[in-house]
Amino acid sequence: MSLNNAPVNNTSLTPLSSLGEFGLIRRLTRRARLANPSSCKGVGDDAAVLDYNNGKKILVSTDMLVEGIHFDLAYVPLKHLGYKAVAVNASDIHAMNGVPRQITLSIAVSSRFTVEALDELYDGVHLACERYDIDLVGGDTTTTRSGACISITIIGEVAGEEIVYRDTARANDIICVSGDLGAAYAGLQLLEREKRVLDGQTLARPAFEGHDYILERQLKPEARGDVTRQLRQASILPTAMIDISDGLSSELLHVCNGSRVGCRVYAEKIPVDPRAARFLEEINIDPLTAALSGGEDYELLFTIPLAAREAIAALPGITMIGYITPPGDGCNIVARDGSLVEIKALGWTNFKSDD
Amino acid sequence: MSLNNAPVNNTSLTPLSSLGEFGLIRRLTRRARLANPSSCKGVGDDAAVLDYNNGKKILVSTDMLVEGIHFDLAYVPLKHLGYKAVAVNASDIHAMNGVPRQITLSIAVSSRFTVEALDELYDGVHLACERYDIDLVGGDTTTTRSGACISITIIGEVAGEEIVYRDTARANDIICVSGDLGAAYAGLQLLEREKRVLDGQTLARPAFEGHDYILERQLKPEARGDVTRQLRQASILPTAMIDISDGLSSELLHVCNGSRVGCRVYAEKIPVDPRAARFLEEINIDPLTAALSGGEDYELLFTIPLAAREAIAALPGITMIGYITPPGDGCNIVARDGSLVEIKALGWTNFKSDD
């Protein structure tokens, strides 16, 4: 994995100014092909044209990624950034039980970016689009005075009766999560540690050996469309669903507050991969805290009726971590010693006072 | 018109950090109501839910506005910025002959912005949404280290047989424009002149008297849905259409190159408002140059069959400026002295070499 492909001064590279805006758009989108029958017209006119005249509902979601806030080009390869930008948007569509179909991608970058740097970013975007069967149908390309900003809007579809909202959990539902939690946060800690180590020491090599899993979870998260497909095949319709972008605590509160219910989640049931746990313990971070508050796992948190318990138990990669309670009971974690700890909003927030 | 409402240090204002991300989103979107039947679910879940199961095609367009590139908060009031961000996106949907229905709005701002500043921005967004019957259905709100970035994605609908692309003009079609051109550029020149005059002179007052029209054309452009409605009522279906965001020259080239045709446009026919012409001449800019290359007019450029000539002539506010020619003839302007001038891409471009 290259960790040093941020834009650099290099005379073999092409300044953005050499292509012009339209030339740049043509270059960046030349590989965008329309695979979905609902994509009538993609990049190249005032708007993309979609056709969903088939009884399906349309889902729309959007995310903005800002340099220095959501990504650090000192250690995030641009290709990974492009891939992740698509994946995290697709995750929002899956969290509604939908299937992602189209994205628009807008980028604003300063002139220190070269055409090759944007090519790399788009390589990642196209790779994710191919993997997830998503069409890139439009976007905008512009400059900033400094820094970079990426905005993706994703459009998906879902049969009306299959939409799953986040605010429809009911008492006694079982709470489930896909995959494992905390590893993306562990990967971020590793990258930031190595960035500090390397600061000013160009000859040092980052100590990433043996940490492939947590690095991949941070740099190349996957949208869990496989999980919603699995649920559909098993005829399980979740009662509520959300993706875990800000940490389990924050998402549990969204589900419970929105649904006007409480919850009881067992600390010992929360899935943390041993490779993440080992690294987190090495740097004195409680793996449970990372799972609850770390964020960026992009796993799915969902609730199912009690009756679906056995069907869920038969599915690989899904863990039952607790159950929904009546509203008066509050949102609690049952610690390993049996004590109840109230869940507070510990999720990642953009607007910290020290910003 | 207040020209000095960029974020300032003022203890009566609320830092963004005081609300938290979710509190801020709630505050900024509390006035977003869903008026369109196709808007099933707006802000508040992983994705908005739309339902267009009525034989219509869906249009999607997106634009990114960056501080210091697309707007200067020294003279653009935030409310106007919000209004304009919606209007320019709606313009893209009208340029496909569609009706705008929903937007998502993502913003990234530094901590020098206050909650009140964002309220102002959203005031303009909501005002435009009300004026154009558009629903705000989602978005993202985040921080930057410096500067501000706004991304809007707009979704609209159109009956499949009424979609008008930009690359379908045919030889002998008549070329029309709505409204007048060059005034937005004149307004920008006025604002930049006064910014230079005022630089460091806080007691001076900007000399904006008598320039309301060009200022409004720059600061508060309108999407021309009224024009497409007018055409529909007159049963005129344009053969090609585009909105004039980068200047008439650039848009003519898009239409002609895309359609593989040429054009002949008469300089004396290009509509320039006398108030814009007067100011432009005062600052030694040729009004025709401003109309051809100025940009940001957000008028509609469209072609109609020769047979619709009389029907168009009966419509107010639409000017026939020339006609489409076979491809070999090139794209030309007939100057006032009768000479032919070839149209070159003079439109505004983001990636200038001196950036």
Image (cartoon, coloured by chain):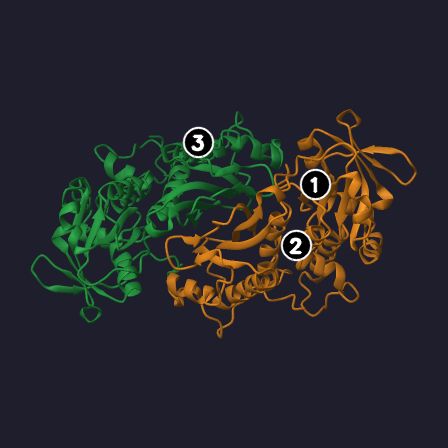
Chain colours: A orange, B green
Q: Quadrant of the N terminus of chain A?
A: bottom right
As drawn, which residue projects farthest toward the bottom? Answer: A12
Per the rendering, the mark at residue B145 is: none
Dot 1 and dot 2 within a common chain: yes
Query: Callout 1: residue from which chain?
Result: A
Q: Amino acid at mark 3?
A: Asp
Q: CA distance from mark 1 to mark 3?
A: 29 Å
As drawn, which residue projects farthest toward the left? Answer: B337
Q: CA distance from mark 1 to mark 2?
A: 24 Å
Kindly identify which residue carries mark 1. A347
Image spot of residue B309 (x, y percent): 15, 50
Kindly identify which residue carries mark 2. A225
Q: Amino acid at mark 2?
A: Gly
Q: Is residue B15 above or below residue B72?
A: above
Kindly identify which residue carries mark 3. B123
Query: Callout 3: residue from which chain?
Result: B
| Residue A148 in sight in this render | no
Q: Is residue B267 left or right of residue A43?
A: left
Query: Callout 2: residue from which chain?
Result: A
Q: Is residue A2 left or right of residue B327?
A: right
Circle 1 residues within 10 Å: few <14, some 14–19, many ≥20: some
Circle 2 residues within 10 Å: few <14, some 14–19, many ≥20: many
Depth check, front residue: A186 or A63 = A63
Residue at x 59% of width, y 66% of height:
A5
